[in-house]
Amino acid sequence: MSNIADLIEDYILRRLAAEQNRKVELKRSDIADEISCAPSQISYVLSTRFTQDKGFVVESRRGLGGFIRIGRVPLQDLIYQDILAKINTETTFDDFRNIIHYLYKREIIKKREAALMLQTISVVFDKLKPDDRVELMKSLILTLANFA
């Protein structure tokens, strides 16, 4: 027999899978009635199994008229967000080359895009001030994310 957290997770995932727009709005009381559990158990599952780093966005309001909105964030968006957060003035040419390689190996970008990015960075990397270099690198990543 599965534990209660697994049952809650399965219930939410089934409801989410049934939605075309990758978002679902639920009520804690409905989930609690369906699974015979306490609302606090639902809150626990939401905070541990439906996190942003696992590809979910959760909006929650308690009380009368309260709701839980859960949406799936495409993994690709999370990857771009993570990369953008890591680029700073300390990012080296090798770091950025590794980022490009990572995106290419996971088939997020094509070989041609990777080659263009590498060529761009190799030409201007040492010629730009660190702040300008960060701006260029983030701009390249944002451009990729916007066309994904």
Image: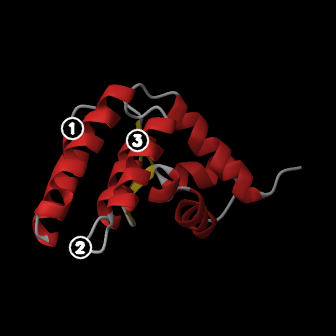
Residue pushed farthest right? 1
Amino acid beneath label 3: Gln
Q: Residue at horizontal 15%, vertical 54%? A: 124
Q: Which residue has dot 3 on it?
A: 76
Q: Residue at horizontal 54%, vertical 48%? A: 30
Q: Residue 119, percent across and down?
A: 25, 41
Q: In this rendering, would 89 be left or right of 99?
A: left
Q: Nearer the viewer, residue 13 or 141?
A: 141
Q: Residue at horizontal 53%, vertical 31%? A: 17
Q: How many marks?
A: 3
Q: Mark 3 vs mark 1: which is more N-terminal?
A: 3
Q: Residue 73, percent across and down?
A: 40, 44
Which quarter of the picture shows residue 38?
bottom right
**Marks 2 and 1, how far apart in space?**
23 Å
Residue pushed farthest bottom? 90
Tags 3 and 1 touching, CB below 8 Å: no
Q: Which residue has dot 2 on it?
A: 89
Q: Which residue has dot 1 on it?
A: 146
Q: Residue 74, percent across and down?
A: 41, 40
Q: Mark 2 vs mark 1: which is more N-terminal?
A: 2
Which quarter of the picture shows residue 125?
bottom left
Q: Quadrant of the C terminus?
A: top left
Observer able to see residue 13: yes
Amino acid beneath label 2: Thr
Tags 2 and 1 touching, CB below 8 Å: no
Which quarter of the picture shows residue 143?
top left
Q: Mark 3 vs mark 2: which is more N-terminal?
A: 3
**Marks 3 and 1, how far apart in space?**
11 Å
Q: Nearer the viewer, mark 2 or mark 1?
A: 2
